Image (spheres, rainbow, N blue to C red):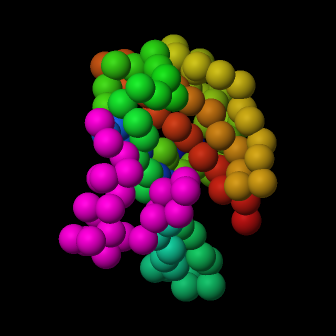
Amino acid sequence: MKKVTGIGGIFFKSKDPKAMNEWYRTHLGIEMSPWGAKFEWRDAGNPEIKGSTAWRIFDNGTDYFEPSDRDFMVNYRVQDMEAMVAQLRSAGVTILDEIVVSDFGKFVHILDAEGNKLQLCEPIG
């Protein structure tokens, strides 16, 4: 069985992303780039393996989280995206789009049992 290997990112909506980015920078020390923040880490079982977790605030008006009406979306790291999607599809899970390959890895969006949009990512390397 294919499974999630970690959290690749956390995304949520805000009425004022610029002010929220500033609040998180000022009070929690999270430095933001135009696309959000990146927390880098190493695998506990194999410290040679590096990874990262993305964190981003979106404007309330974004349609990126649709069809979910929630104000958040979690990105889960997976291995073997094609096998994971096939496994989910055969179990009747709603797959929202096709696997997209980018410079950062493979991505696809699904819905959980309550209609929350989730992003799956198979990072490069």
User: How far across and how far down the image is residue 42, in percent?
Assistant: 51, 79
Q: Residue at x 52, y 17 (%)?
A: 94
113 sits to left or right of 2: left
User: How far across and how far down the image is residue 51, in percent?
Assistant: 57, 70
* 20 within the magenta span: yes
Q: Residue at x 56, y 41 (%)?
A: 120
Q: Residue at x 42, y 71 (%)?
A: 31
Q: Residue furthest bottom?
A: 47
Is residue 97 at least partly visible in the picture? yes
120 sits to left or right of 68: right
10 sits to left or right of 110: left
As displayed, is residue 3 above or below residue 84?
below
As displayed, is residue 70 above or below residue 39?
above
Depth order, front residue of 91/35: 35
Per the rendered image, the range of residues in magenta is 15-37
Can you tell which quarter of the image residue 29 is in? bottom left
Depth order, front residue of 3/51: 51
Can you tell which quarter of the image residue 111 is in? top left
Is residue 111 at least partly visible in the picture? no
* 36 within the magenta span: yes
User: How far across and how far down the image is residue 104, in percent?
Assistant: 71, 55
83 sits to left or right of 58: right
Depth order, front residue of 78/22: 22
Count how many numbered circles sit on residues in the image: 0
Q: Residue at x 53, y 63 (%)?
A: 33
As displayed, is residue 11 above or below residue 22?
above
**Quadrant, the C terminus:** bottom right
User: How far across and how far down the image is residue 12, in percent?
Assistant: 36, 41
**Quadrant, the N terminus:** top right
Can you tell which quarter of the image residue 71 is in? top left
